[in-house]
Amino acid sequence: MSAKLKVGIVGGTGMVGQRFVDLLNEHPWFEVTAISASANSAGKTYEESVQGRWKLAAPIPEAVKNIVVQDASQVEAFASQVDFIFCAVDMKKNEIQALEEAYAKTGTPVVSNNSAHRWTADVPMVIPEINPGHLDVIEAQRKRLGTKTGFIAVKPNCSIQSYVPALHALREFNPTQVVASTYQAISGAGKNFTDWPDMLDNVIPYIGGEEEKSEQEPLRIWGSIENNQIVKASAPLITTQCIRVPVTDGHLATVFVNFEKKPSKDEILERWLQFKGRPQELSLPSAPKQFITYFEEENRPQTKLDRDIERGMGVSTGRLREDSLYDYKFVGLSHNTLRGAAGGAVLIAELLKAEGYIQPK
């Protein structure tokens, strides 16, 4: 009998679902035992359901090839087979909200890659190194949902991972104003160049809804719990532009920042180098040993060279220098489908297990 927790992936046939399948293959704590998707995929083996649309370089893990895909809308039946679920579905916001709450009400923890519940007041939206304390709101959420063991926790937007960790490490100096432009990979849209030939030799200066998320979600990450709800922070003031660029994976950001108490360059570099969070303290399986890596070279970090640092779970920075209009400017980089999507959700689940929120049923 396996001692690993039994994991269900809801939306397991899409690009992020495929990342979950790949990342959880031979995971020390978790084992994928059930996969669900739309009714169109139900009844097929997982290998059959992703035939011709497997998007990763690594092959489909042998352990999941013959799992029969189930209908994600059959909530009770699917939830009864697993200890918790990852959710990465392509549906309307209200439909996702209802689906995730339905799973949580069965007593099943839901770790969501979707954006639908990111602003639900008692749902923690977590970057594990930055705001693990927001998990405290789960108790109030359980009471609202009428469950003793179920709940929803969500991962924030992929684009903010490229600059929020670097700013968080400098919170003692009180950042007041931030200007960030993100240069985002096509996998952030769930596509590759075969799906999206128009992106070859092209840049698109608009990604729907992305700038609003990039400006507001960091404030929720830095918010506080008041009356069993997460209240977003009021500072810093953040403005962004989000641009789609022709790379497969990796979101790069150029960042300008003002501080209330301007640090020296050496102080910034020291804070980045020394920064550790709860995942590092707990030595979680997916946690990067070095969360923030700084490159001294003038032409780093580069998306192609550096997105996979720390197995895609680390964040890279570079080109830190003083600016003529702002106190400092720098470049940040993160892997959008690893740290920014499935990998970040797996790390949240590891934190939830380590802190006792996810247990065998």
Image (cartoon, grey):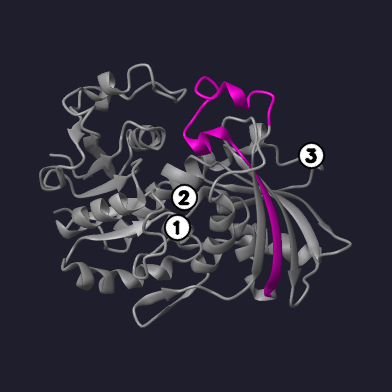
Residue drawn at (28%, 43%) of the image: 30
> Which of pointers 1 and 3 lies earlier in the amino acid sequence?
1
Q: Could you say whether the residue bearing mark 1 is in a helix, strand or loop?
A: helix
Q: Could you say whether the residue bearing mark 3 is in a helix, strand or loop?
A: loop
> Which of pointers 2 and 3 lies earlier in the amino acid sequence?
2
When the figure is inspected, residue 91 is found, relative to residue 165, above or below; the finding is above
Q: Could you say whether the residue bearing mark 2 is in a helix, strand or loop?
A: loop
Inspect the image, locate mark 3, and give the three-letter code of the amino acid beneath it. Asn
Q: Where is mark 3, residue-wise?
A: 299
Q: Position of residue 128 (x, y in %)?
A: 45, 59
Q: Quadrant of the N terminus?
A: top left
Q: Position of residue 152 (x, y in %)?
A: 30, 59
- Asked if disc 2 and disc 1 are in contact, CB closer than 8 Å, the reply is yes
Q: Where is mark 2, residue-wise?
A: 287
Inspect the image, locate mark 1, and give the three-letter code of the amino acid beneath it. Pro
Report the front residue among 309 and 115: 115
Report the front residue among 181 and 20: 181
Query: Residue 190 colored magenta?
Result: yes
